[in-house]
Image (spheres, rainbow, N blue to C red):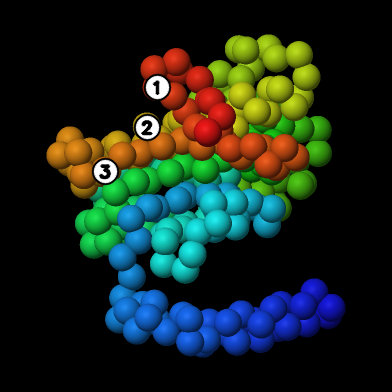
């Protein structure tokens, strides 16, 4: 119960500042709509909050959270139920964002689950699989990241996990371009896409550099 009470106390402090005179100019505009220029697709992990990491203010970023910050490939059928796809459509077509960032991170549970499936494709006890009935199909979006990681043969699990996390973000980045409105906006130089990787222990943010084909520290 203490954790919930902490949230309520935090809300009281937030609202006091939110309604302060110094915030009145922003409120008069924000109540009528939003106009963020950046969309960030981040993991649901409680340790990774794009607004806190970037010191963004309310209204600065349009954030989508899902397990392992994945982007599914574009699917034209109306029978799909990808909330991430719907958010991308809204961000690009209606909000007209200028940047989309895929934000991966260290210690990602979804990526570890993906790697575990590849390390143990046929577990002796299949019973726990019931508890991953949604996670496993979802992680198949970046299944090739685990295949690539297996080929790399990194020395330890942490190194292999980092490779897989970063590779998964690049797959999501590639999937972004399969959305016709994303591709059109990029062709017209109205939109740029990025892949980030955040190291939780170091507080370090890396960005993928297409020229060097490496994740490099943001400066």
Tell me if I can see residue 207 in this picture. yes
Given residues 48 and 126, the one toward you in this image is 48
Tell me if I can see residue 86 in this picture. no
**Viewer-nearest of labels 2 and 3?**
3
Given residues 12 and 41, the one toward you in this image is 12
According to the picture, the residue beneath numbered tag 2 turns out to be 174
Residue 3 as seen in the image, left or right of residue 194: right
Whether the residues at callouts 1 and 2 have beta carbons within 8 Å, the answer is no
Dot 1: within a 10 Å radius of its alpha carbon, few (fewer than 14), some, or many (20 or more) residues? few
Give the alpha-carbon distance from disc 1 to disc 2, as whole Å: 12 Å
Picture layout, residue 29 above or below residue 97: below
Q: State the mark number for residue 191.
A: 3
Residue found at the very far front of the displayed protein: 22
Picture layout, residue 205 above or below residue 87: above
Dot 3: within a 10 Å radius of its alpha carbon, few (fewer than 14), some, or many (20 or more) residues? some
Q: Quarter of the image containing the N terminus?
A: bottom right
Coordinates of residue 24 in the picture (x, y in percent): 42, 84
């Amino acid at each position: 119960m203490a954790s919930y009470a902490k949230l309520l106390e935090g809300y009281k402090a937030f609202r006091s500042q939110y309604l302060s005179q110094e915030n009145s100019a922003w409120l008069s505009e924000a109540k009528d709509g939003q106009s963020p220029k950046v969309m960030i697709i981040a993991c649901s992990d409680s340790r990774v909050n794009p607004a806190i990491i970037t010191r963004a203010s309310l209204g600065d970023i349009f954030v989508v959270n899902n397990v392992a910050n994945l982007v599914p490939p574009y699917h034209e059928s109306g029978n799909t139920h990808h909330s991430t796809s719907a958010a991308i459509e809204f961000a690009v077509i209606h909000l007209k964002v200028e940047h989309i960032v895929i934000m991966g991170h260290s210690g990602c549970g979804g990526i570890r689950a993906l790697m575990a499936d590849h390390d143990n494709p046929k577990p002796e006890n299949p019973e726990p699989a019931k508890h991953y009935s949604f996670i496993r199909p979802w992680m198949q979006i970046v299944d090739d990241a685990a295949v690539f990681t297996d080929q790399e043969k990194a020395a330890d699990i942490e190194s292999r996990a980092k490779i897989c996390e970063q590779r998964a973000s690049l797959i999501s980045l590639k999937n972004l371009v399969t959305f016709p409105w994303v591709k059109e906006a990029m062709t017209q130089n109205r939109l740029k896409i990025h892949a980030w990787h955040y190291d939780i222990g170091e507080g370090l943010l890396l960005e993928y550099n297409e020229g060097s084909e490496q994740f490099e520290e943001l400066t």
